[in-house]
Image: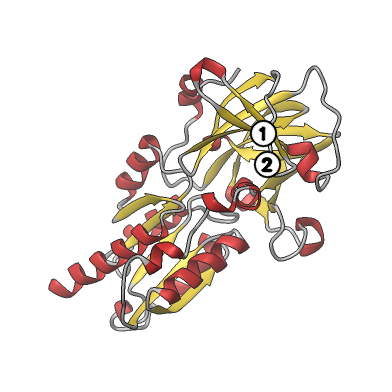
Amino acid sequence: MLLEEDKRGILLESGTNEIEVMEFTINQSLYGINVAKVKEIMVSEPVKPMPHAHPAVEGIFKPREQVITVVDLPRYLLRNTESEKRPKDLFIITNFNKMNIAFRVHTVVGISRISWKSIQKPDKTVSGGDEGIATGIAQCGDDLVTILDFEKIVAEIAPQTTIQLSEIDRLGERGRSDAAIIVAEDSVLLSRMIEEALHKSGYVKTKMFPNGQELWDYLNTLRKKEDVRDAVSVVITDIEMPQMDGHRLTKLIKDDQQFKELPVIIFSSLITEEMRRKGKELGADEQMSKPEIGHLVQVIDHLLSAGQDR
């Protein structure tokens, strides 16, 4: 078992642009998940089916007095074709977006520590199109590992758990803003939803980037500007991204004389106390967990208002 306390020895330093990838198999194919999402690995247990659930939702079980939903990952990847349950199957218990979810897998291979630069964005054939479930292909030693977009998987299975535009409606009547918001988010689905929510809230000047490296490259094109704040009002970044993660991006911005005053918001499914401490060390102005899109807009409002008062 990999328990929360066992992970302390492999937590990464802040801003190093590295990731711990846990490799696992389904039908002999190699997949990966960020260790930061993993709470525990355990041998699969009997599961109580839930009526009217998504076909890939196997049901629920109750380890140590906590009810956890089990997703049959082999079935999901087979597009809901019935998959054989094996006695030696494992449950990977995850925690992200403030939820605990178990994913059935066949074996766990091990953990590799690699640079985000070793993770390439897959082409649409591999990922399954614009909204595919592969966020990257990682080179882990001699193996190529498909990094799955677990947020996308959960959003498809349970749409109510992801970004809700109704949160913007509850903010009431809002005017149009000229503030320029730039966002680094590798999930195509979430990137589109974030941009739609920002536009709906009045922030219509947005630029979306699929990773921290491309956002950083864009910032560097602005170096000749007298005041960067004319082109960028707020930076929003995910943490997990190929090429450059959000912590590394935050560190580069806050260590740079020209960019350090730019407000940086970390908007991620991985906001735990440990991650919050790291983000604070790097100088992030605000940090919040997905899918709290209404809260994100309110924080943008606050940061822009504070900037005008200086």
Crowding near pointer 2: few (<14 within 10 Å), some, many (20+)?
A: few
Picture coordinates of residue 96 (x, y %)? 51, 41
Q: CA distance from mark 1 to mark 2?
A: 6 Å
How many marks overall? 2
Q: Residue 198, which numbered label?
A: none
- Which quarter of the figure has residue 35? top right
Give the left or right position of residue 286, taking residue 51 as reference. left
Q: Amino acid at mark 1?
A: Met
Whether label 1 touches label 2, CB < 8 Å: yes
> Which residue matches tag 1?
50
If the image is split into quadrants, where does the C terminus sit? bottom left
> Which residue matches tag 2?
53
Picture coordinates of residue 235 (x, y %)? 39, 66
Residue under the image location 18 percent in, 75 percent down: 308
Q: Amino acid at mark 2?
A: Ala
Work out whether 123 lies above or below 12: below
If the image is split into quadrants, where does the N terminus sit? top right
Give the left or right position of residue 15, taking residue 255 as reference. right
Residue under the image location 42 percent in, 55 percent down: 267
